Amino acid sequence: MKKLIWVILLAIVACQNNEVDGESNEVVAENKDSTNNKPLVSVVEIKYTSFKDYFHTQGSVVSKEIAFIKPEINGSIKTIHISEGDYVAKGDPIVTISIDVLTAQVAELNEQISFAQYLFKKQQSMFEDGVSTEIQLKEMESNLKRTIKAKNTLLTQVEKGKVLAPFNGYVEELSVKLGESISPMNSICQLVNTDQLFVEADVSENLLSEVKKGDSLSVYFPSLDLQIDDLVLNRIGKIINPINRTLKIEAKLPKIEILIPNLMAELSINHYSKDSTVCLPSRVILKNAKGETYIKIIDQNNKIVLKSIMLGRSYQAKVEVTSPIKIGTLVVDEGKSTVLSGQEVEIYK
């Protein structure tokens, strides 16, 4: 009986020792794994790339051929040849003004010319016969020329009785009615040509040294959700507005039917570009307590090294690096805030 009790006790002690050994082995294994556990980080490789910086401003669509058409003579509207929305070509009639008074004056001048010609011929015949003097002949000749000139002037006024379109375009607004009396102070209609449109904007005078004719730009029309790229700046104003200190810039638009004058536009103008430079995502740039910028790079031993850098321009979360840096350098991206200088890391691939 005593032997049985001792056997049971020895078995219990052996089991307890095995459990302790197992636990100690697990602790050792965990410690070993923890020493080999390196933080994972993602990286950005330094390489040459192109960089462009844009400034943004608001503008609008303009037409170089937009005008309120007015008559050059007084009169009443005899015929209206157009309606609102019509497309007219250059030289097409818009309205005809009654010229009855002018026509009567032309008829009267024709009679005066006939009589002046008769007097001139008679005076010339008398001069040849030695009856009249040369001065009398010259007076008749001058009177005839004066009357003919008056008629030609009046005929010019008669021609202005038909108002013609000065350029191709659409009739936007018709301001007169049949039979109305008008004068050169009154507008007949508004005519606009949409064949050649431009986008125009006012920019700060501070950008005068950075923009030049030929710069590329993009235009976005919010109301149309339309983006047009690769436009060219073809005009820079030669005067600064003294009120808001801006100058005008302009670019020609391609012919697109839905574009119309006064449409609001958002311009993105490329005022700085480099074909080959070093750029980094702004998210990898860090600052120390002194405000100095630096990045965390990985050396050949996979250890973290802090490197100070100088920055240039930035655009859309992309920053130009102006200080020297070796091409191929690996810059820590994800995980940069949790690793320290000198710490060995593992690159996540």
Image: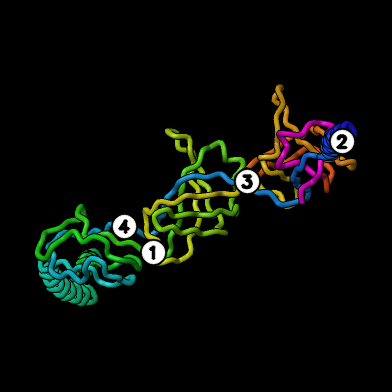
Q: What secondary structure is marked by label 4?
A: strand
Question: Residue most toward the front?
Answer: 1
The label on residue 124 is none
Residue sitting nearer the eye, 151 or 247: 247
The label on residue 67 is 4
Q: What secondary structure is marked by label 1?
A: loop
Q: Judge depth for marks 1 and 2 and give the one in front.
A: 2
Of the numbered discs 4 and 3, the one sitting upstream in the chain is: 3
Residue neighbourhood size for the residue with mark 2, other residues' Cα within 10 Å, grouped as few (<14), some (14–19), many (≥20)? few
Of the numbered discs 2 and 4, the one sitting upstream in the chain is: 2
Residues at discs 2 and 4 in contact (Cβ within 8 Å) = no
Count of numbered labels shown in the rendering: 4
Q: Which residue is mark 3?
A: 53
Q: Judge depth for marks 3 and 2 and give the one in front.
A: 2
- Judge whether residue 331 is colored magenta: yes
Q: What secondary structure is marked by label 2?
A: helix
At 42% from the left and 53% from the top, the residue drawn is 222
Q: Which residue is mark 1?
A: 258
Compared with 45, 117 (above or below) is: below
Of the numbered discs 3 and 2, the one sitting upstream in the chain is: 2
Q: Which residue is mark 2?
A: 4
Q: Judge depth for marks 4 and 3 and give the one in front.
A: 3
At 69% from the left and 25% from the top, the residue drawn is 291
Question: Residue most toward the top?
Answer: 290
Q: Amino acid at mark 2?
A: Leu
- In screen coordinates, is 180 left or right of 123? left
Residue sitting nearer the eye, 165 or 146: 165
Q: Amino acid at mark 1?
A: Ile
Q: Is residue 168 visible to the viewer in this orientation of the structure?
A: yes
